[in-house]
């Protein structure tokens, strides 16, 4: 009995302290990884209807800087959407972290180049991001500059990350608040070679030192800008380096540790109009997009299209992607099983997590919930 007592006591103490630790927020957050998504402002998904149990971080997309002044511009509609966003999320789950994302696909890349090029411009811009983030009670800021055009832009981007981080640390100290997070959406590959003029590589050391994480956009690999069908976001492609496995690998080789990477996942696919409905495999000839926009189609719309048109649905196990076709329409996209495999890939490499572009494209949370389950406890 006496011996048992002695044995039990340390175990109990261990259990109690362990339990107390793992129920604290910090610990849970570490275990849970980063499960995030962008919320495109102005879309019809209300922030208060986001099921935040699937996410640790949600990003407001997007705010733009102003030419000449380099301050962030908060338009009248931004004002409305930002408060809707912050209030809606706080109400649902005060633990979910919010980030203010700056830039985006349609933003002015020359302007970012100009901001990053001079110390004074960077300082004005950085101060403005802190001011806006604190004013609206965000937990962090995110930069989505698509894309730095040359080596010089990449060098300046490194300076921007460094000075931004230092300003966030200083500000947190002065205000006795926790530091704002600093993250950045980046090209799927550590070197940008296929767009713009000439290869240029991201500043790996500055990303490693100054960002909470970088978010490679592992999608937009194939689209109607070329007249052959293909996958928007193949995990593997034996014929080309345009795939997530290669891209994430390039980041790690370039010196960004896996735990500083949050991998992009697409809740949309890309469509084509086939040249010949009977030639409908991957790489089949097409004559343009199947929609009147750029050919992208939201996940929900794809499922609806497949159902209404009795489309053939094929899972490509090599690419870890789906495609469907009906008549002359061809769609490459992701669904639960491919997303689950990709999340497993991210986790097995020790990445910090994943993000979705974007909320509102998976209205019943079927894919987002599978991703969250795949990441696990
Ligand atoms: C959100 O998702 C969780 C986990 O699936 C579920 O238990 C909960 O009921 C959902 N909440 C709402 C409001 O739909
Ligand atoms: C983009 O930024 C550049 C540099 O500040 C500016 O000259 C240009 O007018 C901007 N373009 C638009 C469309 O705002
Ligand atoms: C930016 O903010 C810092 C800290 O508050 C301040 O010292 C500095 O003067 C500001 N710079 C500009 C250009 O506003
Ligand atoms: C990806 O990065 C590697 C360097 O790690 C480079 O050799 C390759 O050309 C890049 N690919 C693309 C498509 O930019
Ligand atoms: C795709 O094919 C159509 C029809 O032949 C043609 O008009 C269009 O220019 C092609 N697009 C590209 C990107 O090659």
Image (cartoon, grey):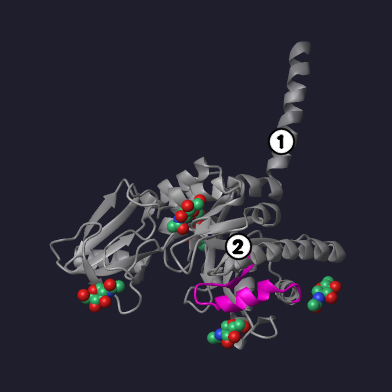
Q: Position of residue 95 (x, y in %)?
A: 66, 58
Q: Is residue 345 left or right of residue 334?
A: right
Residue positioned most to the front: 198
Q: Residues within 10 Å of mark 1 (few under 14, many from 20)?
A: few
Q: Residue at x 77, y 23 (%)?
A: 9
Residue in front for this viewpoint, 267 or 209:
209
Asked if the residue at label 1 sits under 8 Å from ligand 1, the reply is no
Which residue in the structure is indicated by mark 1? 18
Q: Is residue 348 magenta?
A: no
Q: Position of residue 192 (x, y in %)?
A: 50, 61
- The residue segment tinted magenta is 98-120
User: In front: mark 1 or mark 2?
Assistant: 2
Which residue in the structure is indicated by mark 2? 184
Which badge, 1 or 2, comes first in the chain's sequence? 1
> Hey, which quadrant is residue 72 in on the image?
bottom right
Q: Position of residue 366 (x, y in %)?
A: 41, 57
């Amino acid at each position: 009995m006496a011996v048992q007592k002695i044995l039990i006591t340390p175990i109990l103490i261990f259990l109690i302290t362990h339990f107390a630790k793992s129920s604290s927020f910090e610990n849970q957050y570490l275990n849970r990884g980063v499960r995030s998504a962008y919320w495109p402002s102005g879309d019809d998904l209300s922030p208060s209807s986001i099921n935040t149990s699937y996410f640790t971080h949600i990003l407001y997309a997007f705010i733009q800087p102003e030419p000449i002044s380099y301050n962030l511009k908060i338009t009248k509609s931004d004002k409305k959407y930002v408060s809707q966003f912050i209030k809606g999320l706080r109400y649902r789950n005060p633990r979910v972290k919010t980030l203010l994302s700056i830039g985006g696909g349609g933003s002015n890349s020359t302007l970012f180049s100009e901001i990053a090029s001079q110390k004074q411009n960077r300082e004005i811009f950085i101060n403005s991001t802190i001011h806006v983030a604190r004013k609206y009670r965000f937990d962090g800021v995110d930069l989505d500059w698509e894309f730095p055009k040359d080596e010089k832009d990449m060098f300046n981007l490194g300076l921007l990350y460094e000075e931004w981080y230092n300003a966030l640390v200083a500000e947190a100290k002065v205000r006795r608040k926790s530091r704002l997070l600093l993250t950045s959406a980046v090209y799927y590959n550590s070197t940008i070679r296929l767009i713009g003029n000439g290869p240029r590589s991201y500043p790996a050391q500055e990303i490693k030192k100054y960002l909470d994480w970088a978010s490679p956009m592992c999608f937009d690999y194939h689209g109607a800008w070329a007249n052959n069908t293909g996958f928007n976001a193949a995990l593997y492609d034996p014929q080309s380096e345009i795939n997530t496995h290669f891209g994430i690998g390039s980041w790690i080789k370039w010196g960004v540790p896996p735990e500083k990477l949050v991998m992009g996942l697409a809740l949309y696919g890309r469509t084509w109009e086939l040249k010949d409905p009977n030639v409908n495999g991957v790489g089949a000839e097409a004559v343009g997009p199947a929609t009147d926009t750029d050919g992208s189609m939201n996940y929900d719309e794809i499922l609806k299209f497949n159902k209404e048109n009795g489309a053939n649905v094929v899972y490509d196990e090599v690419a870890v992607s789906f495609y469907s076709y009906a008549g002359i329409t061809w769609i490459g996209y992701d669904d639960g099983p491919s997303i689950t495999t990709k999340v497993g890939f991210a986790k097995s490499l020790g990445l910090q997590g994943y993000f979705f572009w974007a909320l509102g494209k998976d209205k019943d949370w079927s894919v987002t919930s599978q991703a969250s389950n795949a990441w696990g406890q």
